[in-house]
């Protein structure tokens, strides 16, 4: 198949894809305060085992120099203990937490602690995990 024909097929599929129901994708969470901003990507963002990628920034959006980061998840009102995991710094400059169990759909609470040379910054928020 020629390049031109492939490009036309891709364009047609792209237009058709807009008519299809949206598939579940990663969840994106943005948490900020005056001192820090944390971008969190939860993949696949469904019940099961999920991976978290943490982009940790200072209040002005520049990369935050972090010595360690910790992720804590809980499902308020369900009586379960929070899941707490240490993040590891990846070669991409982001902090990663793999294979975190999300046991059921609902409104989850996330808390991220970032330890710098001078202080510990804690930001938290809620996010919704859809039912399967």
Image: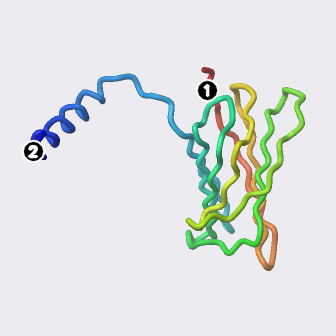
Q: Residue furthest top?
A: 132
Q: Residues within 10 Å of mark 2 (few under 14, many from 20)?
A: few
Residue 84 rendering spot, x and y as whole percentages: 83, 48
Q: Residue drawn at (80%, 51%), measured in percent from left and top?
A: 85
> Within the image, what quadrant is residue 69 found in?
bottom right
Q: Earlier in the sequence, mark 2 or mark 1?
A: 2
Residue bearing mark 2: 4
Of residue 91 and residue 39, the one placed in the foreground of this image is: 91
Q: Is residue 71 above or below residue 108?
A: below
Of residue 100 and residue 35, the one placed in the foreground of this image is: 100
Label of residue 130 in the image = 1
Q: Is residue 131 above or below residue 44?
A: above
Q: Residue drawn at (24%, 27%), measured in percent from left and top?
A: 16
Q: Quadrant of the N terminus?
A: top left
Q: Residue drawn at (16%, 40%), measured in percent from left and top?
A: 6
Residue 114 rendering spot, x and y as whole percentages: 75, 64
> Within the image, what quadrant is residue 96 found in?
bottom right
Image depth: mark 2 or mark 1 in front: 2
Label 1 sits on a secondary structure element that is loop
Residue 117 rendering spot, x and y as whole percentages: 79, 79
């Amino acid at each position: 198949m020629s390049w031109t024909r492939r490009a036309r097929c891709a364009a047609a599929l792209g237009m058709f894809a807009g008519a299809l129901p949206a598939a579940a994708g990663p969840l994106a969470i943005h948490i900020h305060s005056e001192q820090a901003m944390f971008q969190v990507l939860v993949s696949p963002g469904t019940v099961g085992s999920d991976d978290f990628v943490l982009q940790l920034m200072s209040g002005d959006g520049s990369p935050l120099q972090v010595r360690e980061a910790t992720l804590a998840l809980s499902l308020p009102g369900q009586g379960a203990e929070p899941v707490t995991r240490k993040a590891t710094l990846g070669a991409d400059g982001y902090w990663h937490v793999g294979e975190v169990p999300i046991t059921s759909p609902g409104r989850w609470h996330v808390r991220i602690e970032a330890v710098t040379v001078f202080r510990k910054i804690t930001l938290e928020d809620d996010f919704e995990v859809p039912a399967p």
